[in-house]
Image (cartoon, helix red, strand yellow):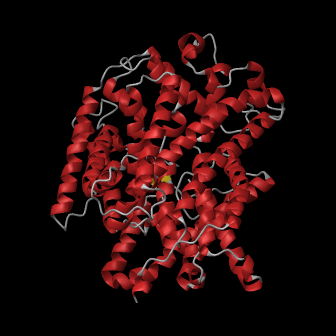
Amino acid sequence: MRDHLQKQEPKGISKRAVILGLILLPINGYWISQLEVVRYTHLTLTVPFTNVIFILLLVTIFSLIIKKLIPKLSLDQNEQMVVYVMLSIASAIASIDMIQILIPTMGHAFWFNTPENEWEELFWRYLPMWLLVSDHNVLSGYYKGETSIYKIEYIKAWISPLLWWLAFILVLVFVMLCINVLVRRQWTERERLTYPIIQLPLETTDNTGKFFKNKLMWIGFAISASISIINALNYFNPSIPQIPVKRRSIAYIFSEKPWNAMGNVQLSFYPFVIGISFMIPLDLLLSSWVFYWLFKAQQVTGSMLGLASSSQFPYYNEQAFGAFIGISIILFWSAKTHFGRIIRGIFNIKSDLDDSSEPITYRKALLGILGGGLFLLIFSTKIGMSIWVVPIFFGLYFLLGMFVTRMRAELGFLVHNLSYLKPSTIIVTLLGTRRLGAGTLTTFSLYNFFIRTCRCHPMPHQLEAFKIAEKVHIDSKKLFAIMILSAGMSVIVMSWIILHLYYKFGADSGYFEIWTIGLGNEVYRQLQNWLYYPTETDTTAMSFMGLGFLFTIFLSFMRTRFLWWPFHPLGYVIANDWGMFNLWSCLLVSYLAKMLILKHGGLKTYRKSIPFFLGLALGDYALGSIWSIIGIIFNITIYQFFP
């Protein structure tokens, strides 16, 4: 009996699972590039990533079929989830918030310099040439196209800076992994967070195949698939009625003062969002859409009081930063016992904490953070960032990574843009640009590729991978190394794919969406404004940061003291997020469905209903992926299921 209760020993990771993941990685990268770079359709805007879910679905179906014919060739759940983890990490790196921004940034300042913008005089001297591409002949092929990246001159110009950026990204990923090792046990085993995002891939790959035998799952699948098919037919033949599930503005309802202060209000009913959001805890669902409307109420109140003349009122971005700091402090405080045991164990002080089952020991994790931090310090100061700014910048960056990771593990919201929390914005608000200097501001600009938003942040995928390892008994020590391998291969493969496309068709030829040039322009226009118009500390914004911090402490106090208190501070932080702007109504539908099922059917009925909602999501993912693949094959524009 005792042996039965013990945890099952993790399995080793099979070579064929890793090989399959590496084979699928360039296919996955090409798919992402065709949709996001060429067609401006974002596979990686939401989690779990659409492309990864669809590939996993194909792998699972293949394994279920081959299991009946040649059982030895079928992949078990352990192996399928290794592929899922590899592609999730690779997609995060290949996404619109990493490599797709980095490469357009590397030559933009030199190609688009003009006598009018005076970029050469303004900031060329601050740019680190060892990280960029400045040769006009090399950039001519890149922007005009009708040539090939496979020329020695071109390869030599790109290979050195890309290798430096590869090293930098790998260190970032490694430090994130080390931080996740330190928090994994506290969040996964002690607080037992629910990890809503991984429920669909886990159910899909279940070895018994019971998920695909569930009638409710197929009903949900059929509903979302039917909606997608009808809307795809409507795209080609407008006489066929459309089912309005995609976002649409209802701002016309609020056209009169003071209601028009709310700005644009979107309404949407995406099946996959409703399905995945059903996994979110009820109090977090409630908090999300309630705080969204409280944010809108602040805008209306400001208009009524005549405060809307300030374009920044109600300073909700700053309120969100204060809330972010408040939640971070609370999280560290709640884990103080766990961290205390880690510190005692590292320094060989009496501690009963056993880290033998962790991906790496706590001592190695701490040394990894310190060693990685030293590399980032040297790298950043070499570019031009002031040495005193480096720990503040990366401290905020990794703290934000922890916050997003926690939010995904607890809330499971599909979109977490959080662009208003990026470190450069916060530091500029707190200190002003005048104190920072041109070198620091230039480094901020070059680092925009990994801080611009948090939609595709790698860190949450890492902790989810460790949770998956626990669930399906994967060796987390080997998985640690495989995630680093996947990140490195993704940088190499995606850089190659993007450069191949740009040199063939021309980054500025009109073949690609404006996103390609716009990303580089965004970086250097911002730098130009910082240097032209120096700023001081924004004291008003700081006051609203304090307000957000205090309100978060109040919300947390109420949650811990009163069981009936329904509001969670995470909802307050994301109220102004792009995801809430577009998906609040989906969360409302999920909340109402979950509340009614729990109230009238109880926990048993709720559990029975889960396959229906997962099927709703899977059908939307599957059909949406099929449309995108058809569009690539036939080079046509077709129905996009999101956004």
Spot occupied by residue 299 in the image (x, y as percentages of width and height): 30, 42
Spot occupied by residue 160 in the image (x, y as percentages of width and height): 69, 30
In the rendered view, tell whether residue 612 sits above or below residue 251: below
In the rendered view, tell whether residue 583 sits above or below residue 75: above
In the rendered view, tell whether residue 79 sits above or below residue 211: above
Number of numbered markers: 0
Q: Residue at x 40, y 59 (%)?
A: 184
Residue 298 occupies quadrant: top left
Foreground pick, 413 / 327? 327
Residue 282 occupies quadrant: bottom left
Q: Residue at x 51, y 67 (%)?
A: 469
Q: Is residue 605 left or right of residue 246?
A: left
Q: Is residue 211 left or right of residue 175?
A: right
Q: Please indicate, yes or no, whether residue 43 appears anywhere in the rendered image.
A: no
Q: Is residue 131 left or right of residue 270?
A: right
Residue 517 occupies quadrant: top right
Foreground pick, 228 / 89? 89
In the rendered view, tell whether residue 215 sits above or below residue 525: below
Q: Please indicate, yes or no, whether residue 300 appears anywhere in the rendered image.
A: yes
Q: Residue at x 53, y 60 (%)?
A: 477
Q: Residue at x 77, y 84 (%)?
A: 69
User: Could you tell me which quadrant the N terminus lies in?
Assistant: bottom left
Spot occupied by residue 485 in the image (x, y as percentages of width and height): 62, 51
- Extreme residue toward the bottom, this view: 1
Spot occupied by residue 471 in the image (x, y as percentages of width and height): 49, 72
Foreground pick, 302 / 253? 302
- Extreme residue toward the left, this view: 561
